[in-house]
Amino acid sequence: MKSCLVVDDSRVVRKVARRILEELQFSCAEAEDGRQAMEYCARTMPDAILLDWNMPVMTGIEFLRRLRKMTGGGEPKVVFCTTENDLAHIQEALSAGANEYIMKPFDSDIIQTKFAQVGLL
Amino acid sequence: MRVEDFDLFSTLVKQRSGLVLTKDKAYLLESRLMPVARKWQMKGLDELAQAMRGRRDEAMARDITEAMTTNESSFFRDQKPFDLFRQLVLPSLTEARAAKRSLRVWSAACSSGQEAYSLAMLLAEEGPKLAGWKFDIVGTDISAEMVERARAGLYTQFEVQRGLPITLLVKHFKQSGDKWQLSPQLRQMASFREFNLLGDLSGLGQFDVVFCRNVLIYFDQPTKARVLDQIARLMPADGVLFLGGAETVLGITDRFKPMDGQRGLYVINKPASAAAGLKKAAG
């Protein structure tokens, strides 16, 4: 079973994403911000990370830049999942090492095809 | 809905589009036709049926047909056919057409154009390998509204997230308000026409590759056979046909045969009459 860390400051979004991912046979863990995600990844590197952009304490993009410098931090497939939906943000995410990008709102179809595209399914 | 009204609508739609509506689809007919009735300032479907029984209005008949046809589409739908196109079909056909350096591809029942444009993007990704080649991608659909949408190459945020990798979105699309528009260079690779698959297809010219996916499932057997037969006439001996996952030629026509081990991919059955003769002889 593959693992996915869901990083979002909204409990509702984490719950919805978790339900979709568990249906796709992922084991899920949750983090409320970039700092918590960093701590989690330092202990266990997940196979996938679904990542919000705007969060308190540490944003998603800052977390991603740090993650990619960590030992083993190049491994997880990172899929952004954010309301930021302009080209500039998408390009910034890709150059920071994101593998895919989902613009909210999302549904299970979108998550499934995006995860399939980066080879997680 | 009254039985005679259901019969009237289903006959009309079948005649015009080939779409078969069975009695269990009455709910679908009702939910799709209510907006049409409202558009024509009518109270309900009985009034719409009444109008169709009287002096038949072409625009109204068209609205009814278009409302019933399915316009579900997404970029790189099912993915696999596009992988097969890139890995198998394209190398063999470009070798076979090396002198002519041109290929024609038909996206039949193209809806809002995602299939045609997925092919355009796929070809663009091949890059310098295909420099100097001319690709003519033709999309046709029975719905004027869909053809117009396809030509515009303008998609909602939801549509560009279904099947389209983010790298291709960044590379080939521009944001336009809350929508995304495909670049003019890519739009140029495809042209779109309003066209009914039940009509005479011969005017479309010859196609090396035909994508006719998730269309035949809506037709009855004789209509499937007729459409496949006509498609075969538009294709050279080495032409390739893609059908949808739930579709087949088996038991419908011997004009095509499945390509060994490649799901959804069909080739012209060259000695069609000979093969039929052999089968008879063997039986």
Image (tube, rainbow, N blue to C red):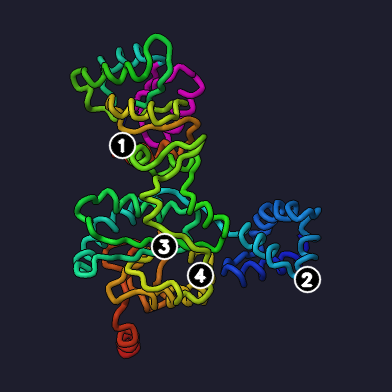
x and y, in percent, of residue B274 in the image? 30, 87
When asked about the image quadrant of residue A56, the answer is top left
Q: Which residue is at 40% across, 73% downward? A: B205
Q: Which residue occupies 49% across, 38% down?
A: B179
The type of residue carrying mark 1 is Leu
Determine whether A38 is above or below B155 in the image.
above
Determine crowd level at label 1: few under 14, some 14-19, many 20+ residues with C-alpha closer than 10 A: some
Q: Eyeballing the image, is B208 above or below A77?
A: below
Marks 4 and 3 in Cβ contact (< 8 Å): no
- Crowd class of label 4 (few under 14; some 14 to 19; many from 20; radius 10 Å): many
* Left or right relative to B49: residue B218: left
Asked which secondary structure carries label 4, the reply is loop
Camera-nearest label, 4 or 3 = 3
Which label is found at residue A120? 1
Q: Which mark is residue B138?
A: 3
What's the magenta region? A4-31
* Quarter in which the N terminus of chain A is drawn: top left
Q: Along the line of sight, which residue is nearer the eye, A32 or B164?
A: B164
| In magenta stretch: residue A92 | no
